[in-house]
Amino acid sequence: MLLTLRSALEKGTVDRIAVAVSGLCAAHCVATVVLLALLASAGGILANPLIHEAGMFLAILIGAVALGHGALKHSFMMPAAVGSLGLGVMAGALSMDHGLEESVYTIVGVAILALGHELNHRASH
């Protein structure tokens, strides 16, 4: 398993997965706002804080692995710094009340994190 993870890190697969997860997060935020506006009961399920906390946990875990490996591989710290800024914005959004403002901050954080992963992927290849 360690060899498979190492191979995935070397090929940039983890960064690509992280960008895809970032896109899913952005889609989730947009869907939550739309569903909250249209269907309050269904939107309540997606707005559950547990979903946001689990997503944040995954973002930190994948970010730490992919961005940390990239920083060690190419010795270029900017992708990790950009990704960390995105994670910080996302974490800050967790402290806000659910609604448009929280969704906007989360989407901005996700976009910054995705940029960090893209920079990391480019620096590695």
Image: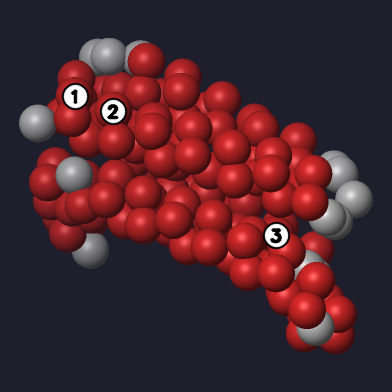
Where residue 122 appears, as percent x and y from the top left, is 18, 30
Query: Residue under circle 3?
Result: 52
Q: Quadrant of residue 36?
A: bottom right
Report the front residue among 53 and 101. 101
Q: Does residue 73 appear left or right of residue 59 in this picture?
A: left
Query: Residue under circle 1?
Result: 123
- Is label 3 in a helix, a strand or a loop? helix
Report the front residue among 80 and 93. 93
Q: Are marks 1 and 3 in contact (CB under 8 Å)?
A: no
Residue at image position (79%, 44%) is 101
Q: Quadrant of residue 118?
A: top left
| Amino acid type, label 3 | His
Q: Quadrant of the C terminus?
A: top left
Mark found first going from the N terminus, 2 or 3: 3
Residue at image position (46%, 52%) is 22
Tell me how far mark 2 sits from mark 3, CA to CA. Answer: 25 Å
Is disc 1 surrounded by few (<14), some (14 to 19) or many (20+) residues within 10 Å?
A: some
Q: Does residue 48 appear left or right of residue 73 in this picture?
A: right
Where residue 51 appears, as percent x and y from the top left, is 69, 67
Is disc 2 surrounded by few (<14), some (14 to 19) or many (20+) residues within 10 Å?
A: many
Query: Residue under circle 2?
Result: 119
Tell me how far mark 1 sits from mark 3, CA to CA. Answer: 30 Å
Residue at image position (59%, 37%) is 108
Q: Quadrant of residue 88?
A: top right
- Is label 2 in a helix, a strand or a loop? helix
| Amino acid type, label 2 | Leu
